[in-house]
């Protein structure tokens, strides 16, 4: 008996605009695709939030016993600077700035992405395909779309014919847009464009002479369109119709709308049964975005080295903060919010540690089975992690009462309580128990404070050789002590 047979999940499906009971195509198996990063810069915390939300979905589905094939791609070509069909390739542009070749950019930021994911205890996806590794599949897909009459070739580029597609299909089915409104709201073509209509989008672009990232194709030496990559990679590993497709809310249109159109045009069927969209992370009330510069990178938050936050925060505290709101809500990253999460995280860890020392009795004053089901109900309700955390805190309260002798638990119930607490905290939420939850930076600060105190004592004892040694040796390690009228502080470089 698998857990998924007794725990039925409801997923909010963007396609229908409501929660639906999740039924995988093949019982016991789930195919899930999530759009991965475009590896032209360091990932910011907004990106991390979206991937973290889907990591939790992956973890919960796996916990229920589903065999999940989780595909998350790497976009390493074809994503142009304004997310549309004009402008420079984001990766080529970065390569020019850094005076390296595009594949060095790809390598540099793919490594950064993986390091960040490890730091935050992500589970690796089952397949991590790259766009440049699937050029052949993309060319084949374009050929089929042309053969089916939904794309046209102009000057070596291939465009998807949105108007033709909409005659027999619904372009806008996901984002709830109407083609007439799109026509009304877009500027007319400027005469320079090869497109028949401004709503059409590129499947293949002929490369200009200066464009470095190029591949041969039947139409030109060029490169694939960004939307096409995801259709080629998702269907290759998950089939023409698969269970779940995820990504950030900002990808719903046009990216995901175009994915649906491409699949429908090539294969005559809708690619995805459940479309899931994670909401945006904000900083100071505004969406975190590289283009506006309103960003904090993970290492800046983890080291405390930034202009926004009063201190450094541990990866699990950031994970906990993220899980304290639903993946579908906008989340504002604030110092107060992080501080509150840090307290909450420690409270939860303290309760889990206490579980090891509890005395058991003849009766249980807390109904563990009922409580356990409430935890599952929370996650079954569209992965409602904040409600789950409320239940974990309820258990923490009970654990403290048992410790204080104000409540009791049988040994059998204690085992179930332990297992459930561990399952949800570590397996599902992906939190990591570190000795005290402190970051390396916190520990460094504590050690330097101690040395400052010893130096003070040395001075009071007129042992200037020792006090100077402490100051000079720390300076040699890049830690400067600054004596001021309110005492000594330190800076690192
Ligand atoms: P990109 O590398 O720009 O394609 O983005 C990678 C993922 O991060 C996509 O799923 C985006 O939707 C997501 N994303 C970008 N900005 C934010 C943000 N501020 N909050 C949450 N997710 C974001
Ligand atoms: Zn995608």
Image: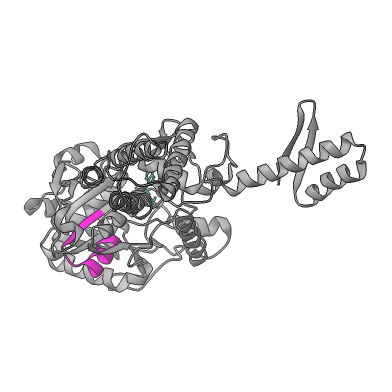
- Please state which of residues 138 and 459 is positioned toward the viewer in this rendering: 459
What x and y, as percent, mark residue 229? 30, 62
Q: Can residue 406 be seen in this view?
A: yes
Give the magenta part as a residue range: 229-245
| Residue with the most extreme front position | 362
279 vs 461, left or right, is left
Q: How many labels does the image show?
A: 0
Image coords of residue 236 (percent x, y): 24, 69
Quadrant occupied by the N terminus: bottom left
111 relative to 87, above or below: below
Q: Position of residue 22 (x, y in %)?
A: 15, 52
Give left or right: position of 336 versus 135: right
Of residues 72 and 180, the one nearer the viewer is 72
* In this view, 153 is above or below 165: below
Residue 406, picture quadrant: top left
Model colouring: one colour
Which residue sits furthest left?
168
Residue 271's x, y, as percent? 17, 59
Compared across the picture, whether 272 is left or right of 117 comes to: left
Q: In this view, does 219 lie above or below 280?
A: below
* Image-quadrant location for residue 321: top left
Using the image as rendered, state which of residue 216 and residue 420 is in the foreground.
420
Query: For residue 243: magenta?
Result: yes
Q: Is 80 part of what is drawn in magenta?
A: no
Query: What residue appears at the point 91 percent right and 41 percent down from the top-left corner?
Result: 463
Residue 196 visible, this orientation: no
Looking at the image, is 206 positioned above or below residue 51? Answer: below
């Amino acid at each position: 008996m698998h857990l998924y047979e007794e725990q039925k999940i409801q997923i909010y499906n963007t396609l229908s605009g409501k929660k639906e009971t999740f039924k995988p195509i093949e019982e016991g198996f789930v195919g899930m695709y999530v759009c991965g990063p475009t590896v032209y810069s360091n990932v910011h915390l907004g990106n991390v939030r979206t991937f973290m939300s889907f990591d939790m979905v992956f973890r919960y589905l796996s916990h229920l016993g589903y065999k999940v094939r989780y595909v998350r791609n790497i976009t390493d070509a074809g994503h142009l600077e304004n997310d549309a069909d004009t402008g420079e390739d984001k990766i080529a542009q970065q390569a020019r700035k850094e005076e390296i070749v595009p594949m060095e950019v790809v390598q540099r930021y793919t490594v950064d992405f993986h390091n960040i994911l490890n730091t935050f205890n992500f589970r690796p996806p089952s397949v991590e395909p790259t766009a440049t590794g699937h050029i052949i599949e993309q060319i084949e897909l374009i050929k089929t779309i042309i053969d089916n009459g939904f794309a046209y070739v102009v000057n070596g580029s291939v465009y998807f014919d949105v108007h033709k597609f909409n005659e027999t299909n619904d372009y806008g089915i996901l984002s709830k847009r109407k083609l007439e409104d799109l026509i009304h709201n877009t500027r007319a073509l400027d005469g320079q464009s090869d497109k028949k209509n401004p709503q059409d989008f590129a499947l293949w672009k002929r490369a200009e002479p200066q464009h470095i990232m190029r591949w041969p194709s039947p139409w030109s030496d060029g490169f694939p369109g960004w939307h096409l990559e995801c259709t080629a990679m998702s269907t290759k590993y998950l089939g023409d119709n698969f269970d779940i497709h995820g990504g950030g809310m900002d990808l719903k249109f046009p990216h995901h709308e175009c994915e649906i159109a491409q699949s429908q045009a090539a294969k005559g069927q809708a690619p995805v049964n459940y479309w899931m969209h994670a909401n945006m992370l904000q900083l100071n009330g505004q969406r975190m975005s590289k283009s506006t510069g309103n960003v904090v990178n993970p290492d800046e938050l983890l080291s405390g080295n930034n202009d926004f936050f009063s201190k450094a925060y541990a990866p699990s505290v950031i994970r906990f903060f993220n899980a304290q709101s639903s993946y579908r809500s906008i989340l504002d990253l604030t110092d107060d919010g992080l501080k509150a999460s840090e307290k909450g995280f420690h409270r939860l860890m303290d309760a889990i540690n206490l579980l090891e020392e509890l005395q058991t009795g003849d009766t249980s004053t807390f109904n563990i089975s009922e409580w356990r089901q409430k935890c599952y109900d929370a996650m079954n309700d569209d992965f409602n992690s904040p409600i789950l955390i409320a239940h974990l805190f309820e258990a923490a309260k009970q654990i403290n009462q048992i410790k204080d002798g104000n409540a009791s638990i049988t040994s059998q119930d204690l085992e179930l309580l332990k297992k459930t607490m561990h399952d949800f905290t570590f397996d599902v939420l992906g939190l990591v128990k570190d000795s005290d939850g402190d970051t390396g930076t916190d520990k460094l600060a504590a050690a330097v404070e101690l040395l400052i105190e010893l130096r003070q004592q040395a001075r009071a004892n007129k042992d200037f050789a020792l006090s100077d040694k402490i100051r000079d040796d720390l300076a040699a390690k890049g830690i400067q002590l600054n004596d001021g009228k309110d005492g000594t502080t330190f800076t690192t470089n």
